[in-house]
């Protein structure tokens, strides 16, 4: 007898939770992560994906169903919610060029980083608070028409996101993105000016970053409470050691990142440590987080095998199938990467995922090889 969606959901949820806790599993769980791939694979233009949240969510679910017809998909890394460019703008305090507005209908959205936050805004934040500055900068960075669509959709639909995926049998690991305040300020100031600020006015920068902590901790704890989805991305992009020398990392990056993860984890939320760029130099620091409280998710630039050696069974990993392999490789290349990854890292404490997201130009044959190989070598 075939299993109903309720049974499949329960099995998949258990499989993913067992992987997080490093418990024995029947196979390596497979997660979908492809906000660029989903619309392309479902015949939806990038403009529709960016500007029509209902169509974007449907494309995400339908793309998962298409792969699930090839081999079982357990869930999604983080839910598709609202207008994607607005989420990027909120995270990086930067304008985003949107298909259908500044870009052609089917061109990929682009972050446009420039100096929007001024030096004097550090004093504004210190005097008025982080949230006051967020309200001040939003009109300068958002496409206001899109922001209105996004807000209205989120208010109406966020409480039912878990149900939308669960109805199709899929477990949602994350429902939101939280981050080190470093990420937003470096985007708003522009990267070069922000790093200069760290040397010219270090105490003022530290004060501002500290003031942003409650804001991002609240995002990391309140949205899981609203949705019932127990995980969030906890981003570490520009705080990466490949951007920050040891002095900057130890003074500006690590102390607050550790605080963010510990405070969000203490609320019972699983942090997916979505760390882009190269973390080789400092990856051992993840041993400071509570055991089995987080998932390490790298993007192909960190040596995941050395990271596994250093971290051991302390934290689970999301396996980092690179964008370059998925988009430019052959199905055999994809199959080989998945096979070697599972052989090298082991099946326990491993969740198969892309190194960040599946690119929009991933061929269908490669996407299918990706899920099939996970089953073949991860069982």
Image (tube, grey):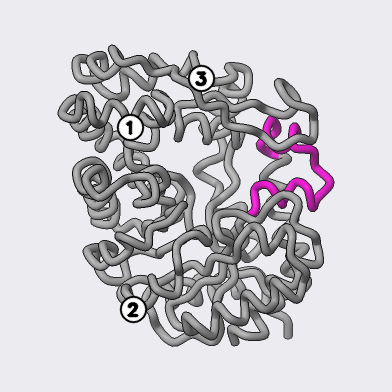
- Residue shown at 25%/33% (left/top)? 209
Disc 3 to disc 1, how far (Cα)?
A: 21 Å
Quadrant in which the N terminus is drawn: bottom right
Tag nearer the camera, 1 or 2 = 1
Quadrant in which the C terminus is drawn: bottom right
| Residue 152 can be seen, yes or no | no
- In the figure, residue 313 lies in which quadrant? bottom left
The residue tagged 3 is: 141
Q: Earlier along the polypeptide chain: callout 3 or callout 1?
A: 3
Q: Residues within 10 Å of mark 3 (few under 14, many from 20)?
A: some
Residue interval drawn in magenta = 34-54
Disc 2 to disc 3, how far (Cα)?
A: 42 Å
Task: Name the residue at the right extreme.
Answer: 43
Q: Position of residue 360 (x, y in %)?
A: 72, 49
- 10 or 303, nearer to the observer: 303
- Residue shown at 37%/25% (left/top)? 193
Q: Position of residue 377 (x, y in %)?
A: 62, 85
């Amino acid at each position: 007898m075939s299993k109903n969606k309720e049974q499949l959901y329960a099995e998949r949820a258990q499989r993913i939770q067992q992987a997080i806790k490093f418990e024995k599993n029947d196979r390596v769980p497979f997660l979908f992560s492809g906000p660029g791939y989903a619309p392309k694979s479902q015949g939806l233009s990038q403009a529709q994906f960016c500007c029509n949240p209902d169509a974007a969510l449907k494309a995400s679910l339908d793309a998962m169903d298409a792969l699930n017809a090839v081999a079982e998909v357990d869930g999604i890394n983080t839910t598709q919610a609202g207008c994607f460019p607005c989420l990027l703008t909120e995270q990086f305090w930067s304008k985003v060029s949107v298909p259908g507005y500044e870009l052609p209908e089917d061109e990929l959205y682009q972050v446009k980083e420039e100096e929007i936050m001024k030096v004097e805004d550090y004093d504004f934040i210190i005097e008025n608070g982080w949230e006051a500055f967020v309200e001040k900068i939003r009109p300068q960075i958002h496409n206001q028409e899109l922001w209105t669509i996004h807000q209205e959709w989120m208010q109406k639909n966020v409480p039912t996101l878990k149900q939308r995926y669960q109805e199709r049998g899929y477990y949602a690991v994350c429902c939101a993105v939280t981050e080190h305040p470093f990420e937003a300020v470096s985007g708003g100031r522009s990267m070069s000016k922000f790093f200069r600020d760290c040397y010219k006015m270090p105490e003022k920068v530290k004060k501002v970053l500290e003031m942003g902590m409650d804001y991002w901790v609240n995002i990391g704890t309140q949205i899981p409470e609203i949705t019932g989805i127990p995980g969030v991305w906890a981003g570490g992009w520009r705080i990466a050691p490949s951007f920050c020398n040891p002095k900057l990392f130890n003074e500006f990056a690590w102390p607050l990142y550790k605080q963010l993860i510990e405070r969000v984890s203490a609320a019972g939320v699983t942090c997916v440590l979505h760390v882009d760029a190269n973390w080789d130099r400092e990856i051992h620091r993840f041993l400071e987080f509570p055991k089995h409280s987080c998932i390490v998710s790298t993007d192909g630039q960190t040596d995941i095998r050395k990271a596994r050696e250093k971290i051991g069974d302390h934290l689970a990993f999301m396996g980092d199938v690179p964008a370059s392999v998925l988009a430019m490789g052959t199905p055999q290349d994809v199959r080989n990467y998945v096979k070697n990854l599972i052989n090298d890292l082991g099946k326990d404490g491993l969740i198969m995922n892309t190194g960040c997201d599946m690119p929009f130009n991933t061929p269908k044959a490669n996407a299918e090889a990706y899920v099939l190989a996970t089953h073949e070598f991860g069982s």
